[in-house]
Image: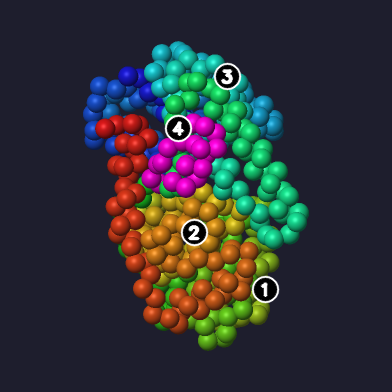
Amino acid sequence: MRIIICDIYVRLVGHNLGHIQNILRFLENHPSNDEYIFLLNPDAQNIPSVKTTAKNVKITFFTEEEFAPFNSGLTIIKSTQIIWKHITRYATDYQANRVIMMMLDMFQHTIGSSRFPCQLSGIMFNPYPRVIPQDSTLRAKQKSTITKARKLFTTWWMCRNAQLKKVFIFNDRETIKNMNETLGTKIFTYLPDPVYDYPTREGLVIREKYKIAAHKKIFLAFGFIDEKKNVVNLLKAMQQLTAGDAENTCLLVVGKIHEANRAALMQALDTAKTIRPELQVEFESRFVDDDEMEAYVGQSDVVSVAYINFFSSSGVIGLAARHNKPVLATKFGVVGDLTREYNLGITVDGFNPEEIKQAIISFQNTKNTYPERASVFVKNHSSENFIKSLLEIN
């Protein structure tokens, strides 16, 4: 069997690179008679870890010309229609038996109206049942209703394609059951969001690097620091702490800051430091390597996944669990459900600084038992389980 694994978002930020790296590593360690072709965006060819020694694996990249529509300012519908034509051509030229899309969401319109030359499956990151209002206002409720209806229609439209055999959804059996029943299908399938295991950077001691005193509890926010990561509301919550609690707190923000979020973030930082000068805040505004990431998580006290406008799964929660670190999590969506199911930490409304503040105080002043079932979570979300499920390997 010849299988194409297609990902158009492999960059030095985000989870996509981690998935590709680990699938490549798995295929090197598990030889088979199947052929695998990785079809990736042009930027991915400049990432050193996107390579393989497996004889049954080939890595190819869209040309800059083929990929140009995606960066040209065209609407998402128009640009993905053009990209999809190239994906279809690659599937035909390679005589593929199956194509696996590592991110299916933006192609739903196109899949529903296309004829595809082979079987198709892929991962959906933002299924429509997880759309909820941002707040309790009528406007927010109306907006979410319209968004959910639109996403429901495009999902139904996608399912019209007879070649679409499986749509994987991370960590969310309730949503899968809902969608299969609503749309009268069985294609929506559970996929464990993997917990990857990387080596830790030797010699990186974060308390020494940032001069964080031993009595301070380190709250870590990391990844691509955009609005979703909610660092602004973390700062608003921390500025409400008493002087004593603030003096015992350090917010460590690790990851490249999205330029669109920088001004609001810096303003929130200035306000927090003015109101609570006792608070320590440290930024490492750059992409960090996997082994650095391991050190930051392993040496922090609490990991923030108190995201806003985000309802799907996050690999951060698994990384925190592997290091047995409690999480400050959003109460909504998959992250909230998993945090409560496995007793991994405290859930809050990310838009509510008062709730976040109370959670911080609880972590500071209460002898918490979190995380209670981190090892069970890690076992259930192993990299091997994820890859075997995605590639449909028995």
Badge 4 element: loop
Near mark 3 (Cα within 10 A), the count class, few <14, some 14-19 or many ≥20, is some
Q: Position of residue 264 (x, y in %)?
A: 68, 61
Label 3 to label 2: alpha-carbon separation? 36 Å
Helix, strand or loop at label 2? It is: helix
Q: Report the Cα–Cα distance between label 4 and label 2.
A: 26 Å
Residue depicted at 56% across the width and 48% down the height: 130
The residue carrying pointer 2 sits among few (fewer than 14), some (14 to 19) or many (20 or more) residues within 10 Å by Cα, namely many
- Residue 337 image point, x, y percent: 47, 57
Residue designated by label 2: 336
Is the N terminus in the top left, top right, bottom left or bottom right quadrant? Answer: top left
Dot 3 or dot 4: first in sequence order is: 3
Q: Amino acid at mark 2?
A: Gly
Report the residue marked by disc 1. 271
Mark 1 and mark 4 in contact (Cβ < 8 Å)? no
Along the viewing direction, whichever of 385 and 90 lies nearer the viewer: 385
Residue holding disc 4: 186
Image position of 3 with respect to 12: above or below = above
Q: Which residues are magenta?
A: 173-193
Q: Residue 243: percent from the left, percent from the top? A: 57, 86
